[in-house]
Every structure is written in C-alpha cells, then in structure tokens.
Image (cartoon, helix red, strand yellow):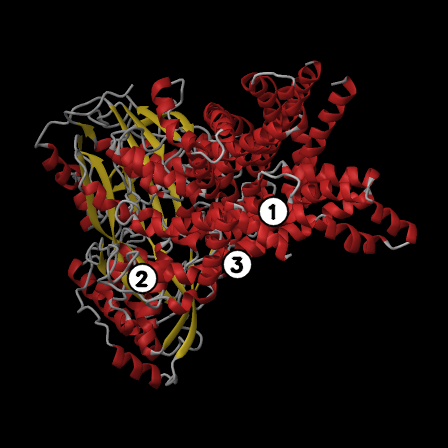
Amino acid sequence: MSASWLIRRILLIAYTLLVVSLLVFGITQVLPADAAVMLLGENATPAALAAVRAKLGLGDPAWLQYWHWLAALLRGDFGMSMRTGQPVGPTMLVALSRSLLLAALALALMLVFAVPLGLAAALRRGKPIDLAAGIVSYLGVSLPEFVTATLLLLLLADRLHWLPATGYVPLTDNPVDGLRHLGLPVLTVSLVLIAHVSRMVRSETIDVLHSDYIRAARLKGLSPRRVLFGHAVRNALLPVITIVALDVGYLLGGIIVVEEIFAIPGIGRQLIVAIESRDLPAIQAGALIMAATYAIANFLADIAYALLDKRIRYD
Amino acid sequence: MTDVVFRLLRTPQGAMGLVILVLIAAICAIGPDIAPVDPEKIDFLGRFRVPGAAHPFGADQLGRDVLSRLLAGARTTVPMAVAATLLGTLSGAVIGTVSAYLGGRWDEAIMRTIDAVMAIPGLLMALLVVNTLGKGSLNATLAIAVAFAPGMARVTRSVSLAARRQDYVSAAIARGEGGAWIVFREMLPNVVAPVVIETTIRVAFAVALFATLSFLGLGAQPPASDWGLMVAEARPFLHQAPWMLVAPGAAIALTAIGFNLLGDGLRDALNPRDER
Amino acid sequence: MIHLHPTRRGVLAAGAAATMLPWAARAQTAAPKRGGTLRISVDQAVGVLNPLLTRVNPEYLVAELLYSGLTRLAPDMSAEPDLAQSWAGNAELTEWIFKLRPGVTFHDGSACTAKDVVASFTAILDPKTASPGRNNVGPVAQVTAVDDTTVRFTLKAAFADLPVTLAYTNAKIVPAALVASGLERLSRSAVGTGPFKLVSYEPDRQVVVARNDAFYDPARPYVDRVEVVVYPDATAEASALISGDTDLMSAAAASEFARLSSSDGVTALRVPSGQFLNINMGCDKKPFSDVRLRQALALTVDREAMVGFVAQGYGTPGNDTPINPAYRFYEALPLRPAQIAQAKTLLAQAGFPDGIDLTLVASDTPATRTQLGIAVREMAKPAGFRIDVQTMPHATYLDQVWKKGSFYVGFYNMQATADAIFSLLYTSDAAWNETRWNFPEFDRLVDEARVTTDEAKRRTLYGQAQTLMHDQVPSVIPVFFDLLAAQRSYVQGYKLHPRGAVFRLDWVWLGTGAPKRS
C-alpha cells in the first residue's frame, strides 16, 4: 500500500463520482415531464408552468445547468430541492445516516450468522446442516426483498407482535424503541446477505480445504482443527471481504425497497421520491452519495484485503 | 454438449434446477391453454374467495382466478427476465471482450468507467432508466439489461484477458486477422463457459428485479398478470386475502431458485478440475 | 355607499354560534380536556409548506394547523367564521364585505389586518405565484382594504357561494411583508395565525407543531402538540395505529378498513363523500359526439357491483352526475340499471352494429383508476365494446391525455358546492373542461343557479342540471367513494369531513386512556 497507490485510488473515486454525476444528469435531462409539471399537477396552466420553471432555473440550457450544479457542489452546496425548497445536502446526509445505520446493523447480523453457517456447511458437506444452509441460502437469494419484507411483517409484527410493524424512531429519541423499529428492515436486508455470503464462505472454504497447501499442512501432521482455523478460515475469508464490498452495492439497492416498505426516511426513499417528482438536485445528490458510499466501501475493502494478505504471507 | 448435460444431471443442484426450469418452461409454453378459466374474467360474488375447489389458489380483488392468472402470467414474467439478462449479458460481453482485446489505455479507460457506472446500485439504475423510457414490461426489460451490462462486462473482460494470452489469439494476430474477427471468432467463444454460468445466476436476479420494478409500479401494467405485478396488487389485501400474495410470491421464488440451482450445477459441470 | 344585503349565508354566519351548533352539541357530552400530544399519520409526504401552494391532503392538513383563512368549511359544507367574523354581499351578489376579527396576531407577533388579507389574495390570484387557489376561490376581480378590519371583494360576475369558496384549501392568510419579499421563506418556516406554531419540519418524515397561545379562540386548540407522521405504505400505516404508535390516521385504505374495524381500541371512521371516478368521453369528436354511444356505454355498467370492485364496498353508486347525497343540492334520480340488450341496440343505432374498439387511458394514481378501467372493460364486453385499458404514469397522463384525450378515467375530490364541481368540470367555460360537452342549456342552468339566493329555486335549477347530465352522459360516473379513516378510541372531537381536504384538528382532544407522549 504505497502512497502512489492511495493517490491513484482516490483519483479513481473522484473519476467515479464525475462519471456518475454526468450519467445521472444526462438521464435526468431526458426524463419525461419536469419538476414544474409534478409540482403543479392539475393546476399546470402555461403561465404557472413558465413561472415555476423560471424560479427553478429549468429554462437554462442543459450544459449551463450542469455547470451551475457542479460549481455549487465544489463549494459544498448540493442546491435546493425543487420539490420542497429545502437544502438538499443536509436532508440527504441525515437520510444517509439512517440508511447507514440500517446497513451497518444488517452487515453485523450477516457476519454473526453467515460465516459460522458457511463454515459449518463446508465442514459437514452433504449433512443436514449443509442441506439446511443450502435451502436457507437459496431462498434468501431468490426471494425479492418486497416479498420477504411482507412475509416478515405479517409474521413477526401482525401475528406474533414481536416487533413494531414500521415507522422510524430516531435512536436519539429512544434507543430501545429505535432499534426495535429497525428490527424488521434489518432482518429483511440481512437475510439476503446471509444467504449470499454463507454460500461464498462455504464454497471458498471447500476450495481452500482442497488446495495443495492445506494438503501439505495436513501431511506435515498438523491437526485438522489447526489447519482449518489457522489457514483455511483466513484464506476463505479473504474473498469474502471482496464479496461484502460488492454486496454494499446490492445493500444500497435493497435499501431502496426496504425503506419504501417500512417507511424509513433514509436515502433510498428520498431517491424514489426525488425521481418521482423529477427533483433534479435531490436525484443528483442521492445518486452521488450512493455511488460515493459504494466506492469508499470498495476502497476500504481493498485496504483490508491488502492488510490481511500481508499477514498471511508472513505466516 | 451431451457430455455437459450428463455431468449437469449428475450434480444434485443441476438436476433439481433443470427439473424446476423444465416445469416452468412448460407453463410458459402451454400455461394460458391449461388455465381453468379466463384469467381476466371478473366475478363480483367471487371476490377474495378462499382457495378451494373452484379456485385452487383463491380469487383476487376482482374475483379473478389466481391460478389461471399465475399460469397466464408465466409467459410475460419468465421470458422477460431471460431476455433482459441475455440482452445485458450480450452487451456486457461485447464491451468486456472488446476492452480486453484493445488492452492498454483503452482497456483501462473502459474498465474504470465501467467501475464508475457500477457504483450506481442496479435497482437505482433500473429506476432511472424506466422512468426515462416510461413504464411497461419492455422498458423494464431494457432497464434490467442496462443495469446488468457493466457487471457482465467486468466478468467477461477478466476471462477474456486470460483468453487473450492464449496461443490461438496470438496465432490469429500473427495471421493478420482483423480486430473484429479476433474478438468474435476467437475470444468470445472461449469466454462462453464462465459467462453462461454467470448469466444463469443473473436470470434469478432478473426475475426478482423485474418483480421489484413491477412492485414499484414501473414494470408490467394492469390488467397483465405478471407475477411481480400480482404481488404488488395483492399487497394491500395482505390481511384480507394472503393467498393472493403467496401464490405469485412462491412462483417468483421457485423460478429464481431454479435458475440459481442450474447456475451452480453448471459451475460444477463446466469446471471438471474442481471435483466437488 | 354599498347597500349591504345580508344573504341567507350571511345571516347564519353573522351569529357564529349558529354554525358551530353541531360541534357544541357534541362537546357537551364531555368537557374537552386540554393538553397532550396527538400523533396523526398521513399517507404522503408534506412536500409543500407554503399554504398558497399546497396540493395534497397531508399538506392541507399541516397548512390548516398553521394558518387561517377568512372562512372555514363546516362538516355540512357551509361556511363558518375563521378570521372573518361576519360577511354580506350586495343585492347583485357582485360585491362582498368581510369583517375581520380584531386583535389577531401572526406567529411572529405582528398584527393580522385587512392589509394582509389583500396581499394574500393578490398573491393567490397572481399567475406567477402558481397557486391552485387561483381557479377555485371564485370569480374575484379585486380585493381592497376598507379599513383595518374590513375587506371588500369585487367580483367579475354575480356569485352566491363566495363565503364557501373562500374557505378553499389554498386561501390562507399570510403576512403582507412576506408576500412582498417573494414568499420564499414560507417553504421553510410558517408565519400564520393558525391554532398551532411550527416546531420542526421534515417533509418526508414528520412535522411537529405546538399550541399557539395567542390563537384567537382562547378555548382552542385542546391538545398542546400535534405530530404529523408520514407513512407511505397503507398497510404499515394501519399497523402503526393498531399497535398504538399513532392516535389517528387521516385516511385509511379500503383494503385495511375491515382490519381496522375489528381491532381493539380502534374506532374506524367512515363518511359518504362526493369523491368520484368517471370515464370521460370527448363529446366534440366522433365517435363520442353521438349521445347514443355514450348512453350505450352507461347502460353496460352495473353500478352496485362497481362499488364492490372499485371501492371494496365502501362507496355509493353513481348516476352519471357529479352530485351525490353528500352535496346539498342532490336530485334523487332513479339509478341507471345495467341493460346490455338496450346498450347493444343503441350501439347499433350509433353505427356500430358489430361492436366498437376503444382504448381507455387510466393513470396509475390512484390505483382505483385502473381497477375501474378493468371492470368497465369486462362489463361492457357483452354489449360489443372491445376496450383496451392503457395505464400510464400520472405525469405523462397529465401532460398528454388529461383534458386532451377522448376516452380516459378521471378522479376528483368532493368540492364544497354543486357550482364548484359543475364549473370545474362540465360547463363550457370550465377550468378543466374534460369532455368538451359544451351544452348551452346546462350552462344556462348553472349560471342561473349561481346568482340565485332562493333555496327552493336553486334546488330546482340544480335538479334540472343533474337530469340533463344523467340523460346526456358527458361522462360515466359509476361510483362515489366513502372517505375512510380510523382513530384510537380515546381520541375525542374528531369528525371525518366529507370534503376530504379539511381536518379541523383544533377541535380534537385526548380522553382517558391516551398514552403520554413526550
């Protein structure tokens, strides 16, 4: 991990954000109907449309709009929401903090369950535990979130009353209540992650167990347990880091649906509302923040990978 | 080819996946013909009828037979997901192979841009594209294809890079063959196996994504009996008539599971070195 | 000097107690208790805070908490005093005088006077403001301040319903100083004269307001604080009320109503309303210019069944006029039955003996539009109508089909008066002339009723107008929706308003059993 590597990675993140902003801006330019139409609805007389468009700056040529937006962004200003007239930056960052909390809890839950499940399945191949893990993981990766979410809501909230159905309570208001309200969304999101990652852990572990150097370690007379936890697990976890980083992309997408269903005012729901109302500054800010989160997660994964990898070579 | 099928059938996942998918393909082919009643026939007195003799999977809010709608809907749901994936795979594969063939700075520029595009979550990308093109099955298909293309480009490129170093490509270059010829005749065929596996698993994703778009009101439109749309329409009646949701939800899950199993089976069947 | 001629409404409103009777009578059963926090859920974001620009019910709800108008709409659709204590029109009904409450202050402490009323209405009527109120407050030509507490409305034409139309959702009074500075501030803060002051505003999550101690009525509001919570998902919203997370839900989905009704501690609320779905036909072009074709389609619809299909039974059958019993001037005509054979005959007479192919456009918001389209398609099939239902996003619909197309599904809220709904949709000069029916006899009846103060005569005129519409069928109106809501049983004083956009939460109080909310 040299300095030049770090600089290169950071430049790549900047390039990523530039491409994303251009792409999203391009798409918003060809979206049918604009924020003025959405704001006025049935009351959109030509005079009212013209007035609102002028106020929102929608009359400018596209390149000028993009330039104004970029210049403001470089000053740290995401602009004003066309829908609500509120500053977009603070709104989106507050929303992001809620989504990140949801994502972090889901990732934590995933790590707690997925790694042991995957290892157990790999070590007991063909046994009931492997079969059960297989069924869980196939179901998890195959069921769309909106189906899982609805079924969990029906079961855990409406029938068993274990968790509140939906709604969002800030942790600062009431930590216990806040966490309980996040229960169903976290479960929904983490189910898919658990399914995906436990499969990866299983297959990586199997690969590693079959690899030459594990065979060599066994031949050297090391106990199977030491072989497993000293070498196999660590080697199997390496690709898992990459998978988790890639899953952040899935996670951010999955959050869009889950937030919509459970009424969590996070960045996913902000984005859906922004797209529906053609709120360009909000779409731009939301997409950029999502892309940045993804890029940074991958960056961190690379660093973690490099660090772990080094330790392995020292072994 | 027969060899691959044989090996596929020997893997438990492959065999199960194949059975499920053959069943679903059969439903796609003859589903509308074996539907017990007209899937669009409304029945005032039969609204929300519980599953029973008349309606094995119950009836919906307009008294339509859920089983008949499910059978008719297979034809719009599954082929759309397959088409979306194939389209995404094809365009991604072309980009990835071309990038690997060009190599050097071009490869670098293309791949960094692909990485950048991949930073936009697939669902968000699909949402943006569908909103731009307008709602509907066809546009949802295109949106999923667009969302899949970058990932497929990345997969194809990495296997193509390996292929590019192979002797037959060098030989073709030495023969003085044109770029397009090399890409399409020499490199693409050799990247097929990993791409087929990846594609199969992605169909499962596409089924779920397509359903999600319909669920968000952006995919198939009523009165279509697309499965995702059926789930979306059933959701408000969750407490009143859960069967409306369970049947199409299970159908989506089964299809996705089928493709996932087949993908895993193919992975084992096509990678003989890895005798798991 | 204008001769003030007190109209029927004017006389009633002059004694404020008279219009408030239904409320007073109910309140007597138990004395309202002050204090507590009311948590009410809404089904959409409160995207717009500026009261002149609000468009959807949750925004109206919040605007009503923070702002006052000149008049308010009572549950019986009559006008009752708000900032105006009394009013009267001249004999010709072309000029109206409103007397304001003295000593009212805005939330920032400044006085609210006739000057602010004039500035607010000038802004509403200015096309640059783009306020939906512009088309709906009545034919106002000019608003002038006579003195600090007297405002004169000069109209473009005689108009008997002005006190009611001035209760329109967007006709709120804001400070003249803010109007002068461009109203920008009102999208982030609230400076009104309403019963509550704004505490916090997060458009997609929650709006919190607290009691305005300087409110003009010392008795109200009863609760100290109102939290308006946004639930975009109907099932989730109902679950939140059932689990006790919320106290009141402003609108319940039909699909949730049975569950709400059977839940402990929950009282489900239901009121018949004039909210309707219709199938608009372009009467200016073939084929719908032929009245026989329109009648044929109307004859295929089983209206009682439609209430079940589209409103899950929570509604009333429509009779092809926009007026139902929820309106004051409803004319009870016999309900048109479904008669397929006669429909076939009419269709053949209209030149389609082999049936007709049509494309019916339905926007995706609300989803009931599509439901109606699918049900009509199936009902009309046996008579020879082959209808293809095409759904599209609401924005595309508004942009390309609405008011322009010749066969599409419309959806409208109840309006305060018969005149408001007729002149919004069906007269030749209607703001949203969807059907281009343009029927001179109908226009004449509506015009005459507009300037008539005699109740019986008005009833006759509106009755004739409804009969005419029923026969001519410019649009098929098969179903009216009941408005549905639900509350925890300890919530007192909430009355579901048939208009849909009116909430009157300053009358609500919390009885025994209400949870303590901090």
In the picture of the structure, the residue carrying the numbered disc 3 is B79
Q: Residue at x 16, y 35 (%)?
A: C264
Q: Is the residue at mark 3 from the same chain as the one at mark 1?
A: yes
Residue C349 in picture, x, y percent from top left = 34, 86
Instruction: Examine the rendering and report whether any part of residue C74 can be seen.
Output: no
Q: Chain of mark 1?
A: B
The disc labelled 3 sits on which kind of residue? Pro
Q: Which residue is mark 2?
A: B64
Identify which amino acid the numbered label 2 is placed on: Arg
Q: Is residue C508 above or below residue B85?
A: above
Measured along the vertical axis of the image, is residue A268 above or below residue B253? above
Vertical arrangement, residue A110 with respect to residue C20, above or below: above
Circle 1 SS class = helix
Q: Tell me, yes or no, whether the two marked residues, 3 and 1, touch with CB atoms within 8 Å.
A: no
- Return the x and y of residue C79 as percentages of the image width and height: 24, 45
Q: Earlier in the sequence, mark 2 or mark 1?
A: 2
Q: Which mark is residue B269?
A: 1
State which mark lies toward you, 3 or 2. Answer: 3
